[in-house]
Image: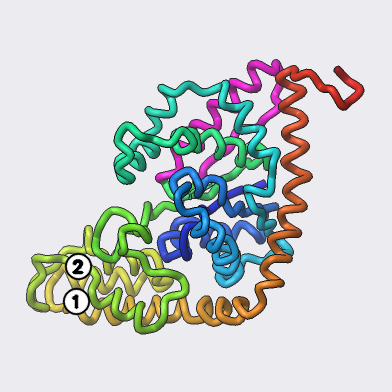
Amino acid sequence: MVLTGDRPTGALHLGHYAGSLKSRLALQDTHDQTLLVADTQALTDNADDPDKVRRNVLEVVLDYLAVGIDPTRTTIALQSALPALAELTLLYMNFVTVARLERNPTIKEEIQARGFGRDIPAGFLCYPVSQAADITAFRAGVVPVGEDQAPLIEQTNEIVRRINRQAGRPVLTEAQALIPTMGRLPGADGKSKMSKSQGNAIPLSASPEQIQAAVRGMYTDPGHLRAADPGRVEGNVVFTYLDAFDEDHTEVERLKAAYRAGGLGDMVVKRRLDETLQALLAPIRERRAQLARHPDYLLEVLRQGTERARAVTQLTLDEVRAGLGLFSLFSASR
Ligand code: TRP
């Protein structure tokens, strides 16, 4: 089983595509896969704007289907409609310390970025525990995520080992992060990460004009003033994007060599990237517009997927309860 999730806080963008949507497209051919619309997790830093989270649930489903996720092969489920996840979270909370949560490098970084200071919502600090519940409830062996999520998988496996030790048998299974080799996609402005909140994201639904404008304004090599000058490829966002999205690697390598040697202008490279992104996003945009006319269908996809996920997650919860020796009031074995 393969599991990943996304927080429904906005439209998915190229960073999501390079970071995990692309792997998920490949994995649905070979694996039993579930995508979790993580609305409960989104609340951990959006409790003051639940409306935004609710509005974006079907938007994320729309993005999935538009890029080619096939709901007959991939289960799409809504986190807040799976009570077993909440109950597992509560049980797991006893197998992780606050100090360990505070040491999680991803959480540390996110706390900084959000400016929480000392006023960290407890739900936010503990979201790795809820993510551990997600991953283990589905018995996910593989979790295709960006590298920023690796510490969360590590923390999940720590919880798994503790629960199993306490239960005296392997009630839960460890998971492995599947991280794309290219690393995370920088924003169009050259900042470390593409993110909607930083205003440097190119959404999957971007119009041709939006794509063009984003590429035109993209960060290159500030020392490359004239086309004739030798330019730097490393840290040059246009080349990073070509590496991520241009399938013709030989041509990209040729362009890099020419750029390094001098004589290749930014405009030429940007034109190539513009063509590449236009070709990638045009069919996604079209499918998205078509599907957006059928909200009932999107709802039905999510409902059916969630139904399936309910059964799976409840089964895991039953086993964890039994493993931890909770008093079972409504079943024969006590
Ligand atoms: N934390 C993930 C993100 O921000 C979303 C997520 C929620 C997730 N539950 C998950 C990812 C389970 C992988 C597995 O993108």
Q: Residue at image x 51%, y 23%?
A: 96
Q: Which quadrant is the C terminus positioned in?
A: top right
Considering the whole magenta stretch, tell me its main secondary structure. Answer: helix
Residue 6 or residue 48, whichever sits in front: 48
Callout 2: 10 Å neighbours few (<14), some, many (20+)?
A: many
CA separation in Å, label 1 and label 2? 7 Å
Residue 26 or residue 98, whichever sits in front: 98
Q: How is the image coloured?
A: rainbow
The image shows residue 85 at horizontal and vertical percentages of: 65, 39
Q: Residue at image x 33%, y 66%?
A: 241
| Image side of residue 101 versus residue 253, left or right | right
Residue where numbered disc 2 is placed: 220
Residue where numbered disc 1 is placed: 266
In magenta, the rendered stretch is: 148-177
The image shows residue 9 at horizontal and vertical percentages of: 47, 57
264 drawn magenta: no
Residue furthest out toward the front: 48
Q: Residue at image x 73%, y 49%?
A: 309
Q: Residue at image x 70%, y 52%?
A: 32
Callout 1: 10 Å neighbours few (<14), some, many (20+)?
A: some
Local secondary structure at mark 1: helix
Local secondary structure at mark 2: loop
Residue 309 or residue 282, whichever sits in front: 309
In the rendered image, which quarter is residue 70 located in? bottom right
Q: Check if mark 1's residue and mark 2's residue have beta carbons within 8 Å.
A: yes
Q: Is residue 229 above or below residue 110?
A: below
Q: Is residue 214 above or below residue 119?
A: below
